[in-house]
Image: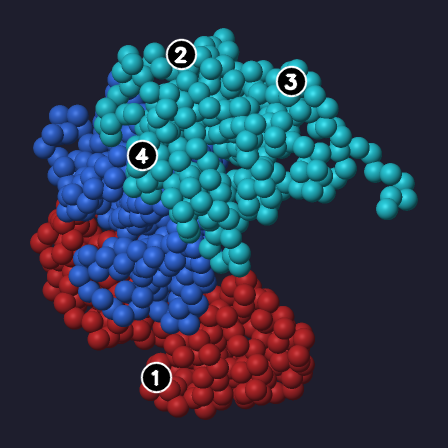
Amino acid sequence: MDDELILDLRGVSGRYRGAAADALDNVSLALRPGDFHAVLGPNGSGKTTLVRVALGVLPPRRGTAELLGRAVARWSRRELARVVGVVPQREENLFPQRVRETVMLGRYPHLSLWGAMGGDDRAAVARALERCDVAQLADRSIWTLSGGEYQRVRLARALAQEPRLLVLDEPTTSLDVRHEMELFELVRTLADEHRLAILLVTHHLNLAARFADRLLLLSGGRAVADGAPSDVLTRETVETVFGWPVAVERFQDRPQVIPLRARKGAS
Amino acid sequence: MRILLVLLAACGTGDHGGRAAATTPAHRIVSLSPAVTELLFALGAGDRVVGRTTWCDYPPAAQRVPTVGDGLAPDLEAVVAARPDLVVLYPSALNEAAAAKLRSLGIAAILLPQDRLEDLARAAQVLGRVTGREPAGDSLAAAIARVVATPAPGPGIRAALIAWDNPPMVIGGGSYLDQLATLAGARNVFHDLGSADVVSLETIAVRDPDVIVVLADSGATGPPAFARRASWQVIRAVRERHFVTLRGSLFGRPSPRAPEAIAAFRRLLEAAR
Amino acid sequence: MKWLVLGLVAVASLALAVVLGPTHVPWSALASSDIIRSLRLPRAVLAFLVGGALGLSGASLQALVRNPLADPLLLGLSGGAGLGAVLAIAFHLGGVWALPLAAFAGALMAMALVYRLGLAGDVEPDPRVLILAGVAVGAFSGALTTAIVSVASAAELRNAFLWLWGGLSGASWDAVLVVAVYLPLPALALLAAARPLDLLALGEEPARYLGADVAPLKRRVFVAASLLTAVAVAVSGVIGFVGLIVPHAMRRVFGHQHRALLPAAFLGGGILLVLADTVARVAIAPRELPVGIVTALIGVPLFALLVRRWTTS
């Protein structure tokens, strides 16, 4: 079962309406249960486009995108939401809900049109709250949460969907060190103990290097490097893609990128 | 100077005079009110009317006079273009401003109340003086006063004067139609209300008028449209089809033809009983 | 428990509307009185249905455009309805149903125009543009209406404004029947969208990822809410604040989930309008206040109170 392909993207290209060029060009990605893939790259390199293609929001111009062996385009949004949990970059929650209510929204893909929430649904919500360590916040209003707490709540909502694949788009922007680490640890645990496939888009090269199994480095819509962190995050590669001088050190058997200061009167 | 004196005298009766200079009785008059137009023609001064509103349709001779707009918001350019030495208006905030404007341009302007027959009598007097035809003015005023003083015969048919149906609007005391109705021998069941007020249908039903009076254009025929509406059948007069339709401009505004209007109104009331 | 109370309040408000009025009807005559049966009862029921339609429409719209200040009247429908009514009067269209039908047609045309503008070149409507388009269309129709009225200068046309702010004085069992037959379809469409609307409150992208078909959802909610508003305006003129306030008040008691909120907004809207109409009929008897004034007089302080509690909680 561990060999089952959850997400299979082969040579996908994607272009937005009215754009002159492809935002994503010939990128491939394969995720199995327990895989933790991080997608990295400078701004505008196609990371979010990749997520959109994987989730059927943007149809691929070329190549194939398959979820559990079926083309993504052939999944209805409801079916997809039962298998893939997404924590998007942005969310504007209009009304001051309680934490429990917002996590319950994750069960909606499983509910029939007129049916009510059952015991199974409530159990799934409780489990999700537990796993993300926000059970004690269940009755708080989301407007009173800190950034880190709110992020974990959103993750709990995605988990309440009981997905096989979890997609997170820049989940740690504006989180402090502790909350960043907590989130990555949590995601790692989800991959290891619960066999979720993880696709995580981030700017954070070093955390991705320490926690992910594979890195996919994009630049200008193309895949520049794809593989184990040590293979991807080399000094030459990083300097070329990001346009900034760096040094790469090893820490606990993983590469860590250290940006160098600009030399005055640099050549 | 005479017109100045005349206007000052007119001030004494509560009308709004002016300080504009003129030297003779007015010879070029713009009338911005149908009642005033009728009065001027009734005084034999119709040939001096050089401008009227589009509503001034009586007497027929008046229709030969050029119009200067509908008079509701006076078209000062048109008025001034007629080169009047006197402009007569109905009192309203808009018209006060217009009158002030005219006076600043050297044109005499007066505002004459015209809501009820008593106002009309006074207006006849003022216009008589202003046109140098005081005897005619005074005798017309006296005739109108006689009409007002003549009591109506009989016990009085109970009537409701309906101005609009959705929402139901009734005409109450203080308005010209109410006065006409009273002089014609009717009792306005809504006499206690203001000149035009919205009421519930049930209020009309409970006050149980014997007839419903409505105003209509000359061309309209038959009972009013609301007579067919289900909710109006609660009112006995509607159910039993006791309608009086007052057609044409004879009834809609104060006029020296009031005796004629009253007589016609009385006939219609009797017929609708 | 809350639902029981709401139901009882609804029944009580209807009873009050039947028992109170500008004229005195003795208790013994309540059942047999023509006034009660032909005037007060249909008017109370119609007020309930219209208020309910406005409350339900308002709650749905606030979710659709993700703006708690949205009111169904922001969609420009009342402007379109007024224009339709004025044109009907100007062309002397006869028949008891001419005005409401013309107003309804005007409202629907406004809805189509607002939707078209709200697409803003895209395939699906942008809710923010929808509101702007609604305000623009409403203002434009209003200006056009005023222009027609002032040019035509017939007293009838000026009275069209009276009708627009008139309210429920034209209520009859016929009107009740028409509205009662018409309401269920758009109302059910909105109730079926209750869960997707919960998701939409998170934003369009998160809603999509939680299984909502966002584009058809927006279309359906916009059309259904517009249809409810159109019939309300066609039957009883412009009545503001009901669609704005009732959803907020109901949220405080029933929460944000639309499965509960939407039916509660319907009942709450019905109650509010029935009570407002009763006040309109009785407050300055024998004269009547326009019910739109009463909803504003009740609504504005209530709204200020709600906003204060909302921001301080």
Crowding near the residue tagged with mark 1, few <14, some 14–19, many ≥20 C-alpha atoms within 10 Å: some
Q: Are marks 3 and 2 on the same chain?
A: yes
Q: Are marks 4 and 2 on the same chain?
A: yes
Location of residue A9 in the rendering, given as x and y in whole percent from the top left corner: 42, 39
Of the pair A164 and B150, the residue shown nearer to us: A164
Q: Are marks 2 and 1 on the same chain?
A: no
Amino acid at dot 3: Asp
Q: CA distance from mark 3 to mark 2?
A: 33 Å
Q: CA distance from mark 2 to mark 1?
A: 92 Å
Residue found at the far top of this picture: A136
Crowding near the residue tagged with mark 2, few <14, some 14–19, many ≥20 C-alpha atoms within 10 Å: some
Quadrant of the image containing the N terminus of chain B: bottom right
Q: Is residue C273 visible?
A: no
Give the SS element for disc 3.
loop
Q: For residue C7, which quarter of the picture?
A: top left
Q: Which residue was labeled with disc 1? A: B59
Residue A189 vertical placement versus B137 (above, below): above
Write the residue at 31% across / 73% down: B249
Q: Earlier in the sequence, mark 4 or mark 3?
A: 4
- Which chain's colour is cyan? A
Q: Is residue A60 visible?
A: yes
Give the SS element for disc 1.
loop
Q: Which mark is residue A127?
A: 2
Give the SS element for disc 4.
loop
Give the chain of mark 1.
B
The colour applied to the residues of chain B in this rendering is red
Q: Which mark is residue A69?
A: 4
Give the chain of mark 4.
A
Amino acid at dot 2: Arg
Q: Are marks 3 and 1 in contact (CB under 8 Å)?
A: no
In the image, A172: left or right of B235?
Answer: right
